[in-house]
Image (cartoon, rainbow, N blue to C red):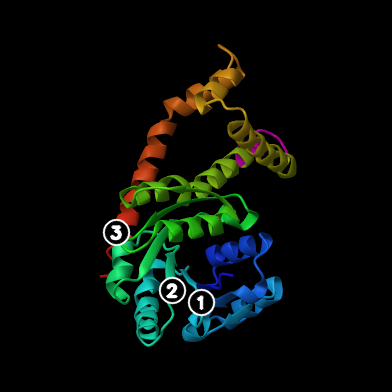
Amino acid sequence: MTRIAVIGGGRIGEALVSGLLGADTKPRDLVISEKLESRARQLTTDYGVRVTASLSDAVEGADVVVIAVKPGDVDAVLTELADIQENSDDDQLLVSLVAGIPTGKFENLLPAGTAVVRVMPNTPMLVGKGASAVCGGRYATPVQLELVEQMLDAVGMVRRVKEAQMDAVTAVSGSGPAYVFLAVEAMIDSGVALGLTRTVATDLAVQTFIGASEMLAESGESPSELRAAVTSPGGTTAAGVRVLEREGLRSAFYEAMAAVRDRSLELGKLVD
């Protein structure tokens, strides 16, 4: 039985807890460290798990310590955690859900030999449809990597990558939901401008993305093949696709994802 401490009760920490509980992890095997009192009460009410403001209380006896805080809070959390671990006999696996921070940064601040697994999750974890990538630090064993992958299976799919690829993962799946939400928002607003009610435009746009995503996942065809199948020569879809291409959709996506990659690299420099 694995006891898991989640440090940070924000959306990603909550998503992991929700998914683990849905995969039959017992509430008694989970504890959340959350200092904001109102948020702590909400998490306790929603999930029935123990929530504490004390980091040392949360990690005591834990097999896995999950760091799910903002990058700017990592330094303070690791400094406190290092002090706790140096005075503890617990052999703990540290799992980072923090964007941009390499495993080496954690290893340098924590006691020598600490096993670290880095994860890039995304917010669809909240509905069990997350896309996560994992990589191990210098001291993480294959068994520990498999344990983390099993945890993440509870909240979606997971892939193992090299750490050098993690910033690209952040650009694709970590920030990817925001691109999708922005595209749906744009489609809804355009539908309203073209005469639909906002309710109808929303229903149609959202269901279109759901249906298209299911086709991508289940058809076995590539995105380009599926796009070609719905784009008749000289037809209505072809007219729309032509405008998107002319306006630089592909280059805009590349520039946006490159910016995410670069920002992820910058965040890695916040913790020395």
- Residue 69 position by quadrant: bottom left
Vertical position of residue 224 compared to residue 39: above or below: above
Mark nearer the viewer, 2 or 3: 2
Q: Which mark is residue 266?
A: 3
x and y, in percent, of residue 8 in the image: 51, 73
Q: Which mark is residue 92?
A: 2
> CB atoms at circles 3 and 1 under 8 Å apart?
no
Crowding at label 3, few (<14), some or many (≥20) Cα neighbours within 10 Å? few
Quarter of the figure that contains the C terminus: bottom left
Mark nearer the viewer, 3 or 1: 1
Amino acid at dot 3: Glu
Crowding at label 2, few (<14), some or many (≥20) Cα neighbours within 10 Å? some
Residue 175 visible in image? no
C-alpha separation, residue under disc 2 versus residue under disc 3? 28 Å
> CB atoms at circles 1 and 2 under 8 Å apart?
yes
Residue position for label 1 = 62
